[in-house]
Amino acid sequence: MAAKPAYDCSRCPGYCCSYDLIEVGARDVARLARHHGIGVREAERRFTRRDSGKRVLRHKVDRIYRSTCLLFDQDERRCGVYQARPAVCRGYPEGPRCGYWDFLAWEREQQDDDEFVPGSP
């Protein structure tokens, strides 16, 4: 039986979505294409770019982090294509703990503010 996660993604401002390089494969691009009702080449062009020979998700400027994944809903602070999210996002954080969540929970306790986000305006 899998260990219950010790984090709550719904209370996080999307830290993992701010990673500079979120690598995606052909299956991920095909899933995004189906989700948006477009061709695979169009999905590659719209949602990805090449970096050091790898296909990664494009980013957009964010008010909390420098930038987030283009597919991240910055108003809701959650994935905008959750059902079609890439495999790397489906598997994150690959265990029962998330280091950022631990840090965020500690900061919120120190600030006595359940909504505190370090670095936010």
Image (cartoon, rainbow, N blue to C red):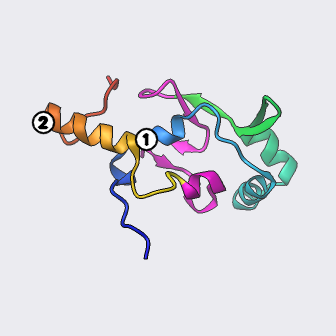
**Identity, as a three-letter code, of the amino acid under mark 1:** Asp
Q: Which residue is mark 2?
A: 112
Residue at position x 23%, y 34% in the image? 107
Q: Quadrant of the N terminus?
A: bottom left
Q: Earlier in the sequence, mark 2 or mark 1?
A: 1
Q: Which residues are magenta?
A: 62-91
Q: Is residue 115 magenta?
A: no
Q: Position of residue 32 (x, y in %)?
A: 71, 55
Q: Is residue 94 left or right of residue 40?
A: left
Mark 2 residue element: loop
Q: Residue furthest bottom?
A: 1
Q: Which residue is mark 1?
A: 75
Could you tell me if residue 65 is visible in this image? yes
Q: Position of residue 42 (x, y in %)?
A: 83, 46
Mark 1 residue element: loop
Q: Which mark lies nearer to you, 2 or 1?
A: 2
Number of marks in picture: 2
Residue at position x 49%, y 51% in the image? 93
